[in-house]
Amino acid sequence: MARFRNKKAAFVKPVMKKQPTVDHITGDKIPKSFVFSRGKLPGSLRQLQMDLRKLMLPYTALKLKEKRRNNIKDFLNIAGPMGVTHFLILSKTETAPYLRVARTPQGPTLTFKIQQYSLAVDVAHSQVRPRCPQDLFKNPPLIVLSGFGTGEQHLKLTTIMFQNIFPGIDINTVKLSSCERIVLLNYNKETKLIDFRHYSIRLQPVGVSRRIRKFVQNHQVPDLRSLQDVSDFVTKAGYGSESEADEEAATVSLPSDLGRVNRASTKSAVKLQEIGPRMTLQLMKVEEGLCSGGVIFSEYGDYGKQKTQETEVEQEQEDEEVMVED
């Protein structure tokens, strides 16, 4: 009697859709990032790390896996083939948490002390109507820097670093529908602190009541049972446009249609709603290389340079201890 063999289906490796490395319009290289930590972080800083990864979408590794035995060289080895241009590294000392922003593969590296921070979930809980849809992160955010034009060399370097960490835009070809988020960094020259904020961008037509706007957006048939005339639906008190929508400084004229409500050549109000995370940063030092090398700037002068060398030695000892434990 004939014997039948079970033929196993050949395993087909799934084809992963690769992200573009060069902008097809501007021709510039698209910056990509890794957000990871060095050392053990408490739960709140772990959540801050995830918030930063989400902020850097879509050109970052949202589910980047890291282990204690991984060092900077391990991340650098895979950064090249994947086109990663920047590292955002979180760490925690006995006194405060720190954020390092580094350019790969040769630096420079900016080290910030995180004076204060609020998670995205905390920002949402403080709002009456939080708004953060999932498709909000399909496009990179815009970057706006304020107060950095003091002429100091380390602030110029900070400006260049943050400008290059996000993709640039061409105002002649950019689509308004892709401008959905904005990252704002404001430098206070008196306190030497940087306010880091993350907002979503919304446009609302000026002079259109909330009822009409929702009717057009949601495609829902309104309930008119309690009204005598359809005009009551449009003119009913308490459902007019918000006061800030009528301010001249908060309105723009759109060059093209954006959605079903905001039409070209009409005025629309620009609304910013914070989505987090929120941080208050202080620039502590600038190094020439990738988390190493000569100190270009230090908040504490020569003492800070000496302290930096001691910190580097301690960090190397910690890396060796981790390798031995594993």
Image: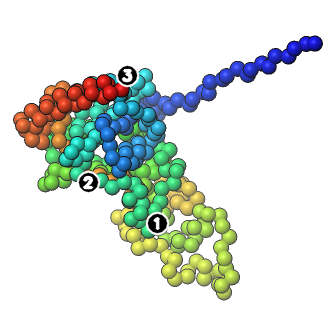
**321 and 36: which is toward the camera:** 321
**Mark 1 or mark 3, earlier in chain:** 3
Say which quarter of the image contains residue 293. Answer: top left
Specify the farthest residue to the front: 325
Q: Are marks 1 and 3 in contact (CB under 8 Å)?
A: no
Left or right: where does residue 299 sit relative to residue 315? left
Q: Residue at x 60, y 79 (%)?
A: 233
**220 and 106: which is toward the camera:** 106
Query: The residue under label 3 is which amino acid type?
Result: Asn
Left or right: where does residue 91 sit relative to residue 27? left
Q: CA distance from mark 2 to mark 1?
A: 24 Å
> Where residue 51 appears, x then y in whole percent?
40, 47
Query: The residue under label 2 is which amino acid type?
Result: Gln
Query: The residue under label 1 is which amino acid type?
Result: Arg
Q: Residue at x 17, y 42 (%)?
A: 284
Mark 1, residue position = 129
**Viewport quadrant of the N terminus:** top right
Residue 77, which numbered label? 3
Could you say whether the residue bearing mark 2 is in a helix, strand or loop?
strand
- Discs 1/3, front: 3
Q: Residue at x 56, y 67 (%)?
A: 213
Could you say whether the residue bearing mark 1 is in a helix, strand or loop?
loop
Mark 2, residue position = 116
Vertical side of 28 occupied by 152: above or below: below
